[in-house]
Image (tube, rainbow, N blue to C red):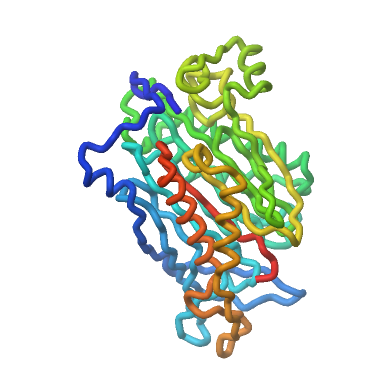
Amino acid sequence: MAAKCGGETETSTPVEPSSEGARRRRMEIHQFRFVAADATVAPPSENGRKRKRVEVEVEVSPVFAGGESEEFGSGRKVAKSKDSGSPESVVFGGVLDEPRFGITSVCGRRREMEDAVAIHPFFSRKPDGNSNDLHFFGVYDGHGCSHVAVKCRDRMHEIVKGELERGGDSGESTWQETMSRSFSKMDQEVADMTTGATGGARSSCRCELKSLHCDAGSTAVVAVVTPENIVVSNCGDSRAVLCRNGVAIPLSVDHKPDRPDELKRIQDAGGYVINWDVPRVGGLLAMSRAIGDSYFKPYVTSEPEVTVTERTGDDECLILASDGLWDVVSNETACNVARMCLKNAKPPSPSRSPGSDVTVTAAGDSSDDACSDASILLTKLALARHSTDNVSVVVVDLRRDV
């Protein structure tokens, strides 16, 4: 990927670290922990009766490389019941339908980490307002510098939540309109941030936004998982793939400049595509849609393509990843790896917490571990196949019978 930033032009050729030790640090995958304390979750009802409110201390195990990446969780939660007083590994918010996921994000062979990942369980209510069971997953692959991807990570879920709360049922046409408005607002916020129009503090990144001509951008692949559907909105060349009964089903199509419909759209808008290493808009940008990249508008648009897929009992997992994975790993291989990890996972051992109606599982038995193993293994596979980009992978367990 390439984009102008502060008057410089970046190509897709990776910049090698200055020493062998630095290169090794960027390729390593380390285990870290951070704690978000005193989080209180109001659980939804199940079978017509409300579950007890549980005050939880959420412990997540992020996996990233060499200090270049952001901190992301593996989905493991540690909670303390007010009644029992003892720490347990408990389903998020005291409900059985928590999202189970694993995240890995590494800098890889790049000089800078420009990917960002956002995970927000129970981030919004269904449009009918009956339950708080919509889960948000997003992968953002920045180019030029990291500030657009970071801005998307911090704000996209809030914008989508705001649009959802403005009503309508969850039909496909409404989802299309909701996500289209959300991406447009996100793009406008990035434009205001880049030019300083909002007057607020600017994000910190490699270019530090010192130049008003900084023209960075980011892909965005977002999945909103509901009890009935998987809604995927894609803008750029990150990708979402559903594994259903052993079959890899792409839920997004990469926005490459040589895709026939995208090439026609660019040319109809007065733009052009040059094949320099890979097809590039204006000879620079290796994707045809992105958030940001104001210099390339209207040829590069922030309009997402939205798919709404009905969930079935055959769904196994959802994989969201930046092109650092997909450049070297096929959809089918990624799904096979994830399925292997899920099938080999130790099944959870449910039990009842003393004096509570909350179902708990013994620490280490959570299927979140399997999702984390899958995301780590996919990342290692991409690095072993000499991916030249940052690699960010999210694996979401969709099985209903675990």
Question: In which quarter of the view is residue 202 placed?
Answer: top left
Out of 282 and 385, give the one closest to the viewer. Answer: 385
In the image, residue 176 lies at what x, y percent?
72, 38
Q: Quadrant of residue 270?
A: top right
Up-down relation of residue 361 to residue 146 (above or below): below
Answer yes or no: is residue 291 visible: yes
Question: Eyeballing the image, is 78 above or below 139?
Answer: below
Q: Position of residue 106 (x, y in %)?
A: 39, 47
Q: Residue at x 21, y 37 (%)?
A: 18
Name the spot of residue 13 as percent of width and height, x first: 37, 28
Residue nearest the observer in this picture, 244 or 392: 244
Q: Is residue 281 above or below residue 235?
A: above
Q: Residue at x 51, y 14 (%)?
A: 274
76 sits left or right of 205 in the view:
right
Please tell me which residue is depicted at 34% across the width and 58% down the height of the picture: 30
Q: How many marks?
A: 0
Give residue 44's position: percent from left, percent from top. 67, 68
Q: Nearer the viewer, residue 17 or 99?
A: 17
For the N terminus, the quadrant is: top left
Residue occupying the point 45% across, 53% down: 104
Residue 165 visible here: no
Q: Which quarter of the rendered picture does the C terminus lie within?
A: bottom right
Residue farthest to the bottom, as pictured = 354
Instruction: Using the image, determine if residue 41 lies above or below residue 213.
Output: below
Between 130 and 387, the one nearer to me in the picture: 387
